[in-house]
Amino acid sequence: MNNSARIDQIIATHAGREGPLLPILHDVQKEFGCVDAEAEAQIAHGLNLSRAEVHGVVSFYHDFTAAADPRAVVQICRAEACKARGVEALIGAAEAAAGGRVRISTVYCLGLCSVGPNARVGSDLHARLDEAALVKLVQSA
Amino acid sequence: MTIVRISDDALALACGADTVANAFAEIGCTVERTSSWGMHWLEPLVEVNGTGFGTVTPDDISAILENCSTKSIGKIADHPFIARQQRLSFARAGRTRPLSLEDYEATGGWAGLTRARSLMPDAVVSEVTLSGLRGRGGAGFPAGIKWQTVAGAAGARKYVVCNADEGDSGTFADRMLMEGDPFQLIEGMAIAAHAVGATLGYIYVRSEYPHAIAKLKAAIALAAEIIAPFQIEVRVGAGAYVCGEETSLLNSIEGKRGEVRAKPPLPAHSGLFGCPTVINNVLTLAAIPHILIEGGAALYDSHGIARSKGTMPIQIAGNVKHGGLFETAFGITLHALIYDIGGGTASGRPVKAVQVGGPLGAYIHPDRFDLPFCYEAYAGVDALIGHGGVTVFDDTADMGRMARFAMEFCAAESCGKCTPCRIGSTRGVELIDRICAPQATVDAVAALPQMHNAAKSARSRAEDIALLGDLCETMKDASLCALGGFTPYPVLSALQHWPEDFEPEV
Ligand SMILES: Cc1cc2nc3c(=O)[nH]c(=O)nc-3n(C[C@H](O)[C@H](O)[C@H](O)COP(=O)(O)O)c2cc1C
Ligand code: SF4
Ligand code: FES
């Protein structure tokens, strides 16, 4: 199945729901790693919206991206409670370990604020990170 | 056979609970996965024959089973951290299996819904009003009055929406409740639906909470027949803090940009898809089943002080030795929370500041640690209890950096609808940078030809501080929602109490 057929299938899965756009965008993002201009146009057509409306939504939310990034992602929480537990001192080492291979991205809070510094790789969560543990996590991502 | 109980809450998993659970299972123990007790510094916390063992690793297992482990904390329910609490919403925490209908029923589950359905809807609303329950999402609006408005609004279709966006740093009670006791939230929503005449409900969960999303979906499927004809669907957010604001959240469910709507109309009159909508926080809805059991409303009202009634699941977070979930009646002081219960900082250094109520809450100085935990007392000192997060900082915290971060966060998360928030937050970051490292040059924006009224000579540091005050006043007065309107509180409180942290380095 080509991309366009698959996107049509995703649209059809959600078409009966109230407010189907976000669930569709989540599925497309998950499957293709992005919601690109072509996908936007196709979704707009499928839901009888303008492309501008769909683009406005895609660009509003941090979870949707316009282009796929093949690198592995390590999300590090840098919100207040993790700052209080010293996350900022670890960022340099994490970035050095990441090099060009891994993308370090910032999240604001993973809901584990009593055991930080915390990071997420996919749906795996990691708590009580020190520099060595975070570097190891980045290297194995 | 030995029964071993280990939580499958996301925080326990992040601390390695699965590895420990698997190791117990491999040697033939029966492992039950329960909710978390909320003693986070002890996770993974393992319970064997009623006795708890903290921060367990697979290496500890043989000692635990041979009854000679040094990690024993005795009977978990008797631990001072648990024994001192008044747990209503978290009464099942640590004690039941989250997706077991059997455990739920055995611990009083569905009693509130059964009783509510035997009452007329307006009687249900008055019990909620009588309980004194106020919204736990931040604003503290009386739940009963909101429900009454929706019940009285005309409309063939009405909705119950649960706000599970929990974006505030330092908070995790919604997550723990959804993962640990999802049926209680479902029951609360079903009671709300009966009270206001809704047939469909949504739970809007942030995408950062995959474990909660999975638990909720499973729990909704299991409870479908019990709550029928009411139906609930889970909707997943997409990484926008502002979508926790109720009207932004409704736009997001509708498939729009998460822009804040002007009020009126109130969501109670015209909410989701233009229909009358009850929108409440997870903790607000989860308190409902208790309130609806016989005598529950009066019991709830008997807790707390002044106009802050009932219990609050307080989240002790940040640089603290004993962090976790502490549910107690309103009125407790920060001093008790941080020192008596929290054990002081994790680093062992002195406490410098505490931020209560997430990123929009003021930084509170140790001088004020006698403040009783209640809506009005906090509002009286320009602070807020918000969603009940308490984040502790030790003396290495740089409050100038924290103030800058507050502005940075506002800039990153602004929905863009109003100028003071969208642009003011970025100007705020620049101003704080200039205050902490004064520049001899005119700032780039002031130098633009179209900035007719801006001074064309470099501002002094004192002028920059005055300008920051001015900017904060504008943001407070002219922002549509609390993101722009409350960001000034952490900024100004940091500047007021720790001006030395804004001093230029020499
Ligand atoms: C920027 C912003 C973020 C908010 N985030 C949340 C949130 O994550 N969860 C929540 O329940 N309420 C949040 N609120 C408060 C909601 O707007 C609203 O008051 C709440 O959902 C009402 O429910 P309650 O009465 O049960 O508290 C936020 C408000 C603002 C202005
Ligand atoms: S204050 Fe900020 S987040 Fe709130 S409505 Fe205005 S621009 Fe949007
Ligand atoms: S602040 Fe980092 S997990 Fe909450």
Image (cartoon, coloured by chain):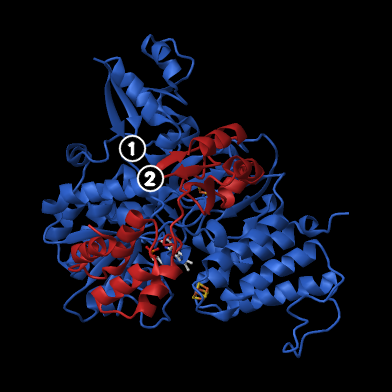
Chain colours: A red, B blue
Relative depth, front residue between B461 and B237: B237
- Note whether B259 is above or below B177 in the view shown: below
Pinpoint residue A130: horizontal percent, then vertical percent: 59, 35
> From mark 1 to mark 2, how far is it between C-alphas?
8 Å
**Mark sitting on residue B6:** none
Q: Residue at x 59, y 44 (%)?
A: A99
Residue B176 circle label: 2
- Tell which subunit mark 1 falls on: B
- Front residue of this view, candidates B19 and B344: B19
Q: In this rendering, would B237 be left or right of A128? A: left
Q: Position of residue B313 (x, y in %)?
A: 43, 49
- Three-letter amino acid code at the position of disc 1: Ser
Quarter residue B180 falls in: top left
Taking depth in this image into account, of B272 and B498 the one nearest to the observer is B272
**Which corner quadrant holds the C terminus of chain B?**
bottom right
**Residue B354, horizontal then vertical, whole percent:** 62, 51
Of all chains, the one bearing label 2 is B
Q: Earlier in the sequence, mark 1 or mark 2?
A: 1
Q: Residues within 10 Å of mark 1 (few under 14, many from 20)?
A: many
The secondary element bearing badge 2 is classed as helix
Res B245 seen here:
no
Q: Is residue B480 above or below residue B403?
A: below
**Label 2 sits on what residue type?**
Met
Where residue B35 is drawn, which disc sits there? 1
- Percent coordinates x, y for residue B398 in the rendering: 72, 51
Q: Quadrant of residue B228?
A: bottom left
Residue A122 vs residue B337, the one in the foreground: A122
Contact between labelled residues 2 and 1, with CB atoms less than 8 Å apart? yes
Give the side of residue A84 with respect to residue B134, left or right: right
